[in-house]
Structure formats: C-alpha cells, structure tokens
Image: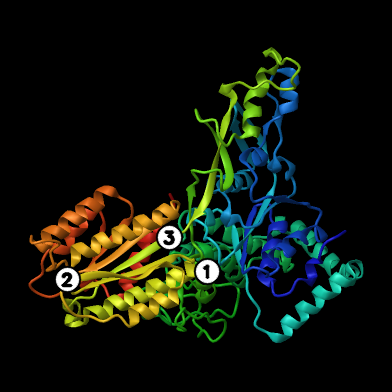
Amino acid sequence: MSGFPFSAVLNADDAKKAIKCMLVSPEIRTVLIQGISGSAKTTLVRSIPRICRKKVINLPLNATEGQIIGSIDIEETITSGERKVLPGLISRADGNILYADDANLMDRPMLGGILNAASDGEVLAEREGLSWSYASDMKFIATMNIFEEPMDTHLLDMFDMCVNIGNTSSEKERYEILGRRLSYDEDAEGFRKKYEKDDAAVSKEIDDAAERLKYVSISDDLLKVIAELCIKVGSEGHRGDIATANASMALAALAGRDDVTLDDVKEAAKMCLGHRMTEDPGDTDEKRSSEPGQEPPDMSSPEMTPSDDGGGAGDGTNDGDQGTGIDGSETIFSVGSTFSVIDFTELSKMRDINSRSYGRHGKTKSTTSKGRYVRSRVSSEYRDIALDASIRAAAPYQKFRKKDGMALALEKSDLRQKVRERKSGASVMFLVDASGSMGARKRMVSVKGAVFSLLKESYRNRDKVGLTAFRRDRAEVMLPFTKSVDLAYRKLKDMPTGGTTPLAAALLKVYTEVRKEIRMRPNERYYVVLTTDGRANVPMSDGDAFRDALQAARHIGNDGIASWIVVDTGTGYPHTDNAMNICKELNGIYLKLEDLNSDALAHRIKTIIGSRGYA
C-alpha cells in the first residue's frame, strides 16, 4: 500500500488519538485537524488506509454541490428523456472516509450539508426538479490552516472532535522529521517496510478496541462531570456532551479497559470541548482551590464515592491529580456530590486558535468573470455561461427537440449563468482630529493607542490602511491606502497636535480619497474611522463651520460609499452632541472614547469591521 506510514508522522499525538477514536467508535463521525501550513495534516490523513480497511476519498476545494451530493446523469437523461441521478462524492464515500483540505475556505452551506450528511447518515438532495434521498455511512475528516480564514462557530460545533497539530520548536524533533522525510523520498517502499509492524500494531489496536467498545460502560458520576463541564465552558447545545462521552468510551476501549475513568474524560474533553468553549471558567466566581467549607476531594482513585451528606467525594486531601486553571490556580467543580478537576489551559488554547482573525477576508459575489465558480443561476444575461448547469437543464428535453445533426440542442430557457465569489479585503482610512483640543486630557494618547492596535490587526489581516489628519486650516492625507503598516505607524507616531479644526474639509478630503480608491478596486470593503469631538471652527466659506460639517456629512452619508465609525473624543463637562450628530448624517456607528480605554476601543472597532466581513 502506497503513502507515508501513519506511525512515522511525528508531533501529531492528539490528531492520531482523535483519528483512532473515530475509527473505533461508530458514533464519532466528524473530526477537524487544525495547524499551520506544512505541519503534516494532509500527510497524516492520507496515511489512514495503512491502519484500517477504509479508503480516503478526497474532496476538491472547488467541487460543486452536484459533484458532492449528486446530480443529473446527463448521458442517461439525454438518451431516455427522463431525469436520472448520478451519485456524488458522498455516495462514493459510503463506508469510507471523506476528506476535505482547507475546509474553512469551502462554501459554508456546502460544508454544513456535508457535516449533516456525516452526522445523520442520510442525504436529502433536491436538484434540477428532482428530489431524492439515500443513506450514507461515511466519516468526515477536515483540515484547516489556522492562519487562514476562521471557521464559523456553528460549523465548528458540528465537528465531534477538533485537535491541533502544533509547530515543533524542538531541534531534535525537527531533525528527526527532516531525516524521515528525506529517507521516504529516497526509498519510499523501504521506508514503508520499516514502519510496517508499527502500523500493523496500530491497526490491531483499533480492531481490538472496536470489538471491546460494546462492553465499555461509563458511570453516572462521570456523566454528571461531563454535563457540568460543558456548562462551565459554555458549550451550547448537547453535541459537546455526547461527543465527550463517546470519545471517553473510545479512549477506554483503546486502553483495553471496560470502564471509563476520569482521565479518559479529561483527555476526551480536550479534543471535544476546546473548539466549543465560549466561557472561561477561570474568570468566574467559582475559580477556587476548593468549595467553601469543604475539603478538597481525593482524586487518586478513578472511582469517586459521594459522601452521605453530599458535601464532598471522599474525606482525603487532594494531593494527586490536580488540574490548573488558566491563571495557574487550581480549579475544582462540583456536581451535587461529585467533583472534577480539569486542566482548562488546554481547552483555552483551542478556543484561542479558533478566535484568531489572521487573514480574515470577506467573500463577495464577483460582478466580473473572475473568481471561483460556486453555483449557477437563471439569468436573462447571456454572459459567463455555466455550461454544465445549462446542459443539465436541457438534457430531459433532448428526446423531443429538433437537433439538425447536433448532439445537443440548447434553447435560451436552458441557459444558466455562473455565480462567482472572490475574496474581498478591507481598506481602512483613519481620519484623525489633530487639532489643539485633542491635546486636552491626553485624548490623543488614547486615540493613538487604539489606532496602533488596529494597525497591527490590519497587518495580520493583510488589509490596506490609510491615514488622514486635520488641523489648523486644512486636512492632509499623510498616507494613501497602503499595505505598509510600518509606514502608517511612523506617520501616526510623529503626528503633531495643535491648531484649529477644519472638520468639513477633512470629511470631503477623505470622501474624495475613498472614491478614487473605489474606482481602482471596486470589490474591496471600505471603512473610515473618524476620531473627533465634533467641534468645528474652520468654515468652508464665510458660513458656520459646524453647519458646513453637517452638510458635508449628509452628502457623504447619502452616497454610502463607505462604512463610517465615529469615535467621539469629547470628554468631561460640558459635552456636546456634535460628534453624534455628525455620525447620524454619515449613517455611521457611534462610539464614545470616555467609555472605553484604547484597547477596548480597538476591540469594538475590530468587532464592527469583522461582523460586516461578508457581503
């Protein structure tokens, strides 16, 4: 059998354990493996056939819905005049493993459909006027690069288990990985023979555990531990509870035991709850070394016997298996009279991985023929024709049409147009009030701190940033839209403060700059972050300076070419509503600086931009 040996993959213990649990338990059907690029995620998955009798069916990233769930058999339909179904990849994966690389980049409804098919064991398909269903006894393994676009929370929750392959920092391990890879490239067959016995041992371990699983039991006390743990970490729904219980039993079977222990639950929780964690137990009032008025329980035994009065589990001191909280303190949870000790540090690591926003670009429908073809639609425009969908639409009618020697007769009603998607980055222009009032109460310190944080985030997301400052009698574009965040940092750091406030001129200056950028890159998302106290004192003409600013804001808001976030820097007493009124005219989102420190302000702005990431 070809492929890299399963046993030869280093630094992937958690991923291997999750795969073995999936192969042992019929109830564990979906696994997500996360890691950086080049961490052997794909190599590991493709080595699975060497330890079991299942095939790995690859799911291409650009596969269409018809290719995945099934579509019309064009040849048969044309011949018979009746719609016939052609099975898709899910049907081919029946009894085997369907594998998707870069699953986080897949079309979300499509990924959700695959996860539902794997969990429910049934597929309901409705396409081209046909509706049919079929059973699917498949497993689904997906991988994703943690530095690419994150996966939606509801899709993460549909994975029974989620594990991470880390990047090794050990020189010894890196040396060993390099040596194994070079040996494999030099003599693949010889290298596989070297690990043949190890893979055979893993295969026997899985077969024995699958046979033993039917005899494995889990106590009510441990089920209560799992239930409370899921509540503590904020796992929504019941998928986390069920997955943790099933994984605990699979781990016990792999260890050759018929009873689940607390250690099995701990290990299962790391793989089944980290990606579902929405709350940090270390931040709650229950973070403590023990329950008030209670002695810490004796966790030296896997069996925990409740005391008669319900006050604890045993009367000994806990000098054994202590877990540590996120801040290093010990954490003990009680369920009635049962206690559990869990190391939340591991769970938090997985939660942190899934909350990263590195490289998070939105997806927008492309108005040109560029971008990835994701689906087709009926359209009166006859451009960028989806030939596959058009042929499928025409196939049932070929028996009744005049072909005049042609193999296929198409009519206008058959034609379908491609729907394409392309990534859309975000371009953020910082419009900063650098007038003398910003020096009061050190407002500029907070503003610069927030903007610095946002610049760092823009660098991670590979977004474009720009910087415009207004003071004295004019607004100056200190930095046009660029990906050079370092340059923006230096410009902002050295920006002077003082003088009057030409607010109207600043609004129109940025409006012109954004319009110019939109003409060159129409598919981007544009944001303007305006920091101002709203006090305008430099009119456009001989009129009122603030009225000029309101008129400029109204004109820009009606145009709607960008999303505006207005940060009111006015503090203390008296406080005007000038900035809020400017924000209303801009149809923007209003934030108040005195309610937020620089970090909180940056977080709010990032949240606003992130929530509008998808067109």
Callout 1 crowding tier (Cα within 10 Å): few <14, some 14–19, many ≥20 = some
> Image quarter for residue 283?
bottom left
- 557 w.r.t. 68: above or below: below
- Label for residue 198? none
Pinpoint residue 436: horizontal percent, then vertical percent.
17, 79
Mark 1 and mark 2 lie on one chain; the one further toward the N terminus is: 1
Mark 1 and mark 3 residues within 8 Å of each other at the beta carbon? no
Residue pictured at 26% horizontal, 82% vertical: 496
Q: What residue type is labelled 3?
A: Ala
Mark toward the start of the polypeptide (1 vs 3): 1
Quote the CA–CA distance across marks 2 and 3.
Answer: 28 Å
Q: Is mark 3 on a helix, strand or loop?
A: strand
Q: Name the residue under label 3.
A: 426
- Using the image, tell me which numbered label, if any, was put on residue 501: 2
| Cα–Cα gap, marks 1 and 3 | 22 Å
Percent of width and height locating residue 189: 91, 66
